[in-house]
Amino acid sequence: MPGAFININWNKKKLMLPYSLRKDYISFTDRKWDWRYQINRDGSANINNPSLYELLPSGEIKKHFCKTEDSR
């Protein structure tokens, strides 16, 4: 997925995060924000339960609880 991005509208913030290769999960990060999908046992992404992490300058990682919106 080189060159892939995800656009997120969250809490009055608009984030455009590039894909970042990881072993145990799918990650989109700009080193300040990290959006993750866990990998299911069958190898697919668990798109119904994403995680958003805020990587603070102090080194602390703050987890924000999120859910996807159905865009039907």
Image: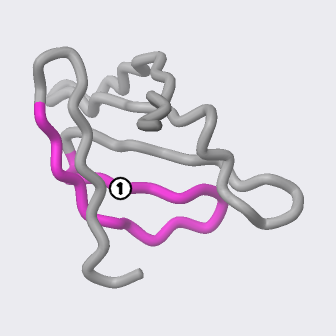
Give the residue drawn at x 20%, y 15%: 11
Q: Is residue 23 magenta?
A: yes
Say above or below: 20 vs 6.
Answer: below
Q: Position of residue 3 (x, y in %)?
A: 25, 80
Give the residue drawn at x 78%, y 66%: 43
Question: Which portion, as a residue range, is magenta?
Answer: 14-31
Give the residue drawn at x 40%, y 18%: 64
Residue density around tag 1, few if under 14, some if 14–19, many if 20 or more, within 10 Å: many
Say above or below: 23 vs 59.
Answer: below
Instruction: Write down the residue under mark 1.
Output: 28
- Type of residue at label 1? Phe
Q: Position of residue 1 (x, y in %)?
A: 41, 81
In this orientation, which residue lies closer to the viewer: 32 or 38?
A: 38
Give the residue drawn at x 35%, y 55%: 28
Q: Quadrant of residue 69?
A: top left
Q: Position of residue 9 (x, y in %)?
A: 21, 31
| Residue 48 relative to residue 55: left or right | right
Q: Main secondary structure of the magenta part?
A: strand
Q: Is residue 27 magenta?
A: yes
Secondary structure found at label 1: strand
| Residue 9 relative to residue 70: left or right | left
